[in-house]
Amino acid sequence: APLRAAASGLPVQALRYQVFVGSATLAGLAGGLWAAFKGAVFPSVASVAMSVDALLVILLGGVHQLWGSAVGSALLVWGGAELGQGLDYWRGVLGLVIMLVMVLAPSGVLGGLQMLLARFASKRGRA
């Protein structure tokens, strides 16, 4: 929230620059380590399916959650392993699960859990 940060007296442009440089550094390091681990990098690695998987990870875990990508990644890997065993079209079922998550918890699984916990705490406070 740049307006809030500016109202608080924080240097917004400097912070944006630091975050951009830091994220680019981490992305470059991750790519370099991945290439060293695999031994070679080909253009086919940057396929549409990989981009969609990255989007699914974020949507599943939660967009505004710190641990959302870790939870989404675990759910996607687990769901792919479990659904892929008995279903030929497991990605279609996974798509239905994603749509269900987006309807029930638009902010992802972690956001939905936070919503449920807040609702439970408010009911408990009233009792």
Image: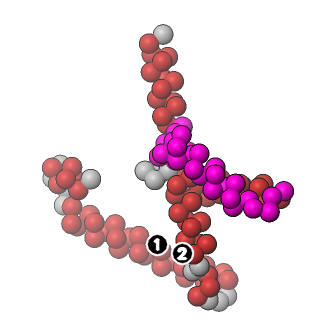
Q: Amino acid at mark 2?
A: Ala
Tell whether label 1 touches label 2 (CB within 8 Å). Answer: yes
The residue segment tinted magenta is 86-113
Hey, which residue is sitting farthest right in the picture? 86
Secondary structure mainly formed by the magenta segment: helix
Label for residue 14? none
Residue kind at label 1, given as amino acid type: Leu
In the picture, the disc for residue 26 is 1
Q: Is residue 77 above or below residue 97?
A: below
Instruction: Tell whether position 102 is magenta.
Output: yes
Q: Is residue 82 visible?
A: yes
Q: Position of residue 116 (x, y in %)?
A: 52, 31
Q: Residue at x 44, y 12 (%)?
A: 126
| Residue at the image position 52 percent from the left and 43 percent from the top | 103
Instruction: Work out whether residue 67 can be spotted.
Output: no
Q: Position of residue 10 (x, y in %)?
A: 19, 56
For the rendered model, the colour scheme is secondary structure
- In the picture provided, is 1 more to the left or to the right than 102? left
Q: Nearer the viewer, residue 6 or 54?
A: 54
Up the image or down, 17 lies above or below 45; here it is above
Q: Is residue 11 left or right of residue 54?
A: left
Q: How many marks?
A: 2
Q: Secondary structure at mark 2?
A: helix
Tell me which residue sits at (34%, 71%) in the image: 20
- Is 27 positioned to the left or the right of 1 in the image? right
- Residue 122 falls in image quadrant: top left
Residue holding disc 2: 30
